[in-house]
Image (cartoon, coloured by chain):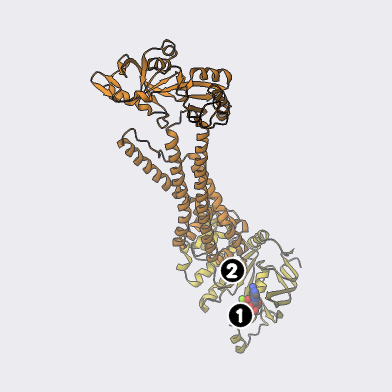
Amino acid sequence: MSNSIIKVENLHKSYKMGNNALHVLKGIDLDIKAGEMVSIMGSSGSGKSTLLNILGILDTYDRGNYYLDNIKIEKMNETKAARFRNKYIGFVFQSFNLISFKNAMENVALPLYYKNISRKKRNQMAMEMLDRMGLKEWANHLPAELSGGQKQRIAIARALISNPKVILADEPTGALDTQTSYEVMNILQEVNKMGITVIIVTHENDIAHRTQRIIRLRDGIIGENITNGDFQPITDNEIFTNN
Amino acid sequence: MFDRDRWQEILNAIKQNKFRSILTAFGVFWAIFMLVVMTGAGNALTNGITHGFKDFATNSAFLWANRTTVPYEGYDRGRWWSLTNADMEAIREQIPEIDVLSPRLQGWNLREGQNVVRGERAAAFNVMGDYPQYREIDPCTMPYGRYINNEDIELKRKVCIIGEKVYEIMFDEGEDPVGQYLRINGVYFMVVGVFKSNNPNINIGSNKKETIYLPFTTMQQTFNYGDQVHFFGFTAKPGVNVQSIVDRIKPIIKKHHKIAPEDDQAIGGFNVQSELQTMEYTFLGINILIWVVGIGTLIAGAVGVSNIMLVIVRERTKEIGIQRAIGARPALIIGQILTESVFLTTVAGFLGLAMGTLVLHLTDMALEAARAQAPPDEQSFFMNPEIGLPMAVASIIILVIVGLFAGLIPALKAVRIKPIEALRHE
Ligand SMILES: Nc1ncnc2c1ncn2[C@@H]1O[C@H](COP(=O)(O)OP(=O)(O)O)[C@@H](O)[C@H]1O
Ligand SMILES: [Mg+2]
């Protein structure tokens, strides 16, 4: 219990759609230990992003419990949520979500700006992080001048800069070719080796295969929870149903 | 507020909406420009009009005799009558609230042909009889010599003081007129001074520049006016209402001259205090109008800024979502939008202020140039268009407030953006 970084009990979430409610998560139980690297799989629309957003305190849940680093996460105001996100969580998105008019270094430094760290200090820290990503010479380039792989590495650097305990990555390789995908996965594995918990949403088997554990969502509950090694690739048929 | 990241955001947002930003900023620019120019013009009007009598005793009034309009005690209506020395004494005695009382003679009948002669020179001028006290009602400077004094009055000296125009025509330029003689309607008077009124725009009875003032008593005797007083001016002691004194003077005069108490037109008058008050209300009205129009335009400008900020917020929805996801607090987002809005309005408004001031300055220069060429007698009703520093400071403060208000709705809208919603549409 004490070393679980994320613990979810009987989590429910539904979206109101006019008069109807779309029940997306119907009782999720999840326990992720600190330092684990986990992938979440499931067909399109199965609620992977919804779950990840709740874990990242970007969204609220209706019922159940959620403990982040043993702190119960409940409805909270935005200022407090922002502080939690800044302290515990780093996000990596499929579409990178870099700020277009800021160069690589400034993008990486941005979370530190929200922590009121001086410009000089945060740029220096951002440069170190870029160096570790092998992107030092791209520091002054704008996102538009970078390749997809480079952009994602910058996004990872930005996620790492504030020393989070958890990296939440929603289909981080979804927009990348296989070669680049593997490079990004290498980096995420490196990150994990540093002791940071990594949770990756993906529907690519080979990506999932590189994590220690695979959680498969099905019909709003956890359908399978496979520790790596026992992993069975899903059939071709199923792959087609994943957008 | 002054860190580089925030300014980077602001400049970028403006850069991305260059045309729209400039267009909306123009609204604020125009509002301030109009406000400045209109206020300047209003001030110029006030300056131009009040300049002509800025030194005139504002707590004063003038009264004179008119034909009666009501039959009374056996007299028909339409009777001519005259104010007299005795009236003046009675008034002075009975109304201690009067500060200065200055009876005057107006020599209408004297200005005929060329009534003033000096050697070869001859011209027609007005002649008036005055007490030294008149200078306290209508202050003047003396380019030469002195004003009429009490000894002149007591000794009925044959002296005179002359207006600028009289000096100009009867004397050579730069010539000292003091001690020289003028023949006025056949009688020689020694010039003791040249006066230059501080209030050239107020002329009661005659154009002062073309007038010769004689000691009142001298004039009464020399030109056979008996004990007549043609009209008189007075000032009220501080804190006393001029009209209340007028209302007390009239019955005294009416009783002396057997004028019906209800005859309102038998005594003519001009109350400087109440006329000025009317004028002040007019100026106040003009100012209020200017501000109403100016503020209205400014509000329209603010709505424009608010609109462009809404557009900017909408276009940056995703960006704001990202910032929120990586830890930006709502206060920071609000601060950003507000700074941006205040920046837009203040810069635009400041340009308006600068431009308006420039236009006023150029107008002022043009007016000065025009005045230099115009004949010196011409009255100008438009002078020194300018706005004061307080007005400039006030408008900057108003701009900041307007900017804050304009940014308020967009800022609240920006914090209501949920990060997930912002990030979802990909
Ligand atoms: N904000 C929302 N409002 C309404 N429905 C939503 C919202 N977000 C997601 N959904 C719906 O919830 C379901 C799960 O979505 P999501 O978690 O994005 O699935 P996944 O990431 O597994 O593809 C989908 O049917 C989606 O249409
Ligand atoms: Mg998804």
Which of B364/B64 is in front?
A: B64
Residue at the (33%, 37%) spot, across then down: B371
Residue at the (69%, 61%) spot, across then down: A77
Label 2 SS: helix
Q: Which chain is orange?
A: B
Amino acid under label 1?
His
Residue B422's disc is: 2
Which of B416/B262 is in front?
A: B262
User: Whole-percent x and y of residue A85?
Assistant: 65, 63
Badge 1: residue crowd in 10 Å (few <14, some 14–19, many ≥20): many
Badge 2: residue crowd in 10 Å (few <14, some 14–19, many ≥20): some
Identify the residue under disc 1: A203
Amino acid under label 2?
Ala
Which of A14/A117 is in front?
A: A14
The chain holding disc 2 is: B
Residue B333's disc is: none
Q: Is residue B309 left or right of residue A38?
A: left
User: Whole-percent x and y of residue A141?
Assistant: 46, 63
Q: Farthest residue to the top: give it.
A: B155
Q: Is residue A40 left or right of residue B288?
A: right
Please tell me whether residue A94 is drawn above or below residue B210 in the rendered image. below
Which of B309/A186 is in front?
A: B309
Which part of the image, by quadrant, shows the C terminus of chain A?
Answer: bottom right
User: Whole-percent x and y of residue A3?
Assistant: 73, 66
Q: Farthest residue to the left: give it.
A: B120
Please tell me whether residue B370 is drawn above or below residue B186 in the rendered image. below
Q: Which chain is yellow?
A: A
